[in-house]
Image (cartoon, rainbow, N blue to C red):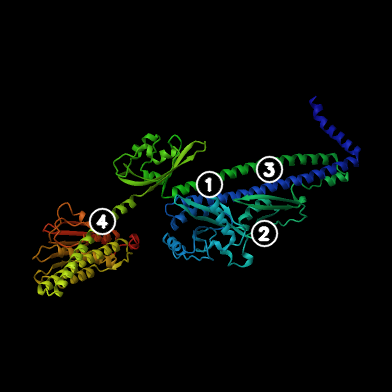
Amino acid sequence: MNRKRAGSGPGRATALSAMVAAVGCTITLGISILLLQREDASAEVQMDRRTAVAADAVRSETRRYLDALRITAAAAGAQQTLTATEFGAITEPLRGMQLAGTSSIALVVPSTDAGVPGTQQLWRERGATGLTLAPHGDGDHAFSVFATSLDGGKVPLGLDMMQAPAPAGALAESRRSRDVSVSDTYHLLADRSLPAHQQQNSFVLAAPIYRAQGFLGWIQLAVRGQSFLGSAFTQAGQGLLDLSLRAADAEGRQVTVAAMSPATVGERDLQRTVAVPVADGTWTLHLAAAGERLPGAHSVLPLAVAGGGLSLTALLTALVWLLASGRERARARVRAATGELAARGTEGRRQAALLQAVLDGISDGVGVVGPDGRFLLHNPAARRILGANETGSDVDTWQQHFGLYRLDGVTPFPTGDLPLVRALGGESSEQVEMTVRNPAHPEGRVISVSARPIETATGERGAVAVFHDITDRKHVETELRGFAGVVAHDLKSPLTAVRGYAELITESLDAISAGGGPKAMHHARNSTAKVISGAARMEQLITELLDYTAARDATLRVGEVSLRGIVDDVITTRTDAPADADCRPDVFVGTLPPVHADPVLLRQVIDNLVGNAIKYTPPGQAPRIDITARAEGGDVVRVQIADRGIGIPDGEHAAVFDSFHRASNGAAHPGTGLGLAICRRIVERHGGWIEAATNPGGGTVFTFTIPSAAKDTSEAPLVGVA
């Protein structure tokens, strides 16, 4: 029986061949017509399939650009103060994303006619050195202030995007909708200087930047159309399709954004048109192909059948070919679906890596907690600010785990008032200040926390918080408050004296006019001297305040300086005309090596220390000053200035370098308490230190370090504003 079945195949083939021969031309013609119809249908199916692939390629490519733009805008909005450096760090990952056709990504900010100078100055201060805004027309403006080139070309800054209707409309719609907007097609402003044949129909994508303070501006991505979709069209068309992507320009006309026409021959008898959404706009994709060139749409089978000369073998070969081609098409569909799934997985991983890179790169801490209080995400900055690598899983233990206190640093911060706890309850918090003190921050750090509720992927409520370390700002505020109080007190005393003695002068002048004689004249002169003395005290205070500001903020102009030359100049100036000829200062100056410093500020340090040595010498005693120096380690010079004055009481040697602090035994000597604070500021800006100690022979020894002239200056950050 098995042998019969094995042998029934050829017999059946013979019978089929006989039947085909018997039916003759009628059957042959019918089969030929049927095959032609199937080929036409196959061409239509192939055209539909390739149309879908091309449309998906355009959608996928534009979606990738939109996601990158949204992430970049969110990262820019998360910055406390967006500077050119932070903008460069945020946009740097886009260089590696292979965004075809992109020209540049820029920060665009709004301005009015009256606000142009202020806007220009603000963004210059944030890093746009040399920025010059070029407003176009009157009314509202939108200027590019920061930019990163994505194609290697030079990106002009200061352009007014409102001068072209296309980008102006995209910016306005983006701000209104709070989402990404695509412009009408136009020639990029940066390309208008190119020859006409090199200019492409282009567009811009604009994403708004919103922060807690309100609207900041836009992130604008400039894209050249042909370059943008060239690679996607090549892959989708496979040399068989004419593709063109069209969009409206500013006047509503349909213009071609990108097009590709392969070098295939034949009549384009198959055409398709598909609407492709891009951001808030819609583009039109046109496809055309020669049906005879599409796979499976043309074969020699109908001609062979029509000729009637095919044998049963040719017929069976044609049927086997059809079955094989059917299996191959099925395999191609499986491969395409698998490739698309893999591409989506790769894109998802790329987006996750980009988000992680942004979170790891920002200076503010970011933390996300789930509904159970467990941290789902916290970036390195959050761990550094909170001072704990391990996150507490129980909300009730957060205060103890992280060491959270009120601003007094003593009162524990109530758990129910913590911003993240309130956010888990659906309540937002903005810039809540608290103190963090734990083993990582034993001295305590002051932070500002903002938190908002969010929904997790499972639909449950979570929370996100942003942590900002404001310790330095708090220190500056404290210093400013103390500074204002001392200045007000020190200025009020001489002003009161000036006013009182001025009134006495007026009364004395009135007495002189009434014939008061020498006594009234003496009163007037004495009061005038007091007024001059008070004015001199105010002048001294203001001068030392200016010196203190310069010591803190002035730009260092360092170079090789003769320490001996500066010391000689100060000694000559201070001892040239002493008030008491019998108490001329006795100064010893040892060997002084050259140093690497700002000569003006270094002279101020030497002059202040030598002046103090002379001023704080007991009356009737000649000042004795020893100035010596020695090199240490080849890159630092240690300078000592010793005196035989009244000295500094025990326990106050460190405090005398604080602003407005005066030693308790120096009340009889005039001064503002800023001189030694100025010395410490200047020395520290040169990378050194200064201290005071008791001189074993009586008086005080001041010691400070300064870079040696032999030091490699590339290692010392001495030039710039501290």
Picture disc at residue 351: 1
Query: Is residue 226 rendered to the left or right of residue 395?
Result: right
Mark 1, mark 4: which one is toward the viewer?
4
Sequence-wise first label, 3 or 1:
3
The amino acid at mark 2 is Arg
The quarter of the picture where residue 410 lies is: top left
Q: Is residue 222 visible?
A: yes
> Looking at this view, is 522 or 595 the one in front?
522
Residues at circles 2 and 1 in contact by the CB criterion of under 8 Å: no
Q: Are marks 4 and 3 in contact (CB under 8 Å)?
A: no
Q: Residue at x 60, y 51 (%)?
A: 280
Q: Are the two marked residues, 4 and 2, in contact with CB atoms closer than 8 angstroms?
A: no
Q: Which mark is residue 253?
A: 2
What is the C-alpha distance between the residues marked 4 and 3? 81 Å
Q: Which of pointers 2 and 1 indicates the residue nearer the eye?
A: 2
Residue 155, given in percent of the width and then of the height, sits at 52, 62
Q: Are marks 3 and 1 in contact (CB under 8 Å)?
A: no
Amino acid type of the residue tagged 4 in the rendering: Gly
Q: Earlier in the sequence, mark 2 or mark 1?
A: 2
Mark 4 or 2, nearer chain start: 2
Residue 522's disc number: none
Q: Which residue is mark 3?
A: 332
Q: In the structure shown, which secondary structural element does the residue marked by tag 1 occupy?
A: helix
Q: Earlier in the sequence, mark 1 or mark 4?
A: 1
Task: Give the spatial CA distance, label 4 vs label 2.
Answer: 68 Å
Q: Name the residue at the top extreme.
A: 1
User: Looking at the picture, does residue 658 appear above or below residue 20?
Assistant: below
Spatial separation of the CA atoms under disc 3 and disc 1: 28 Å
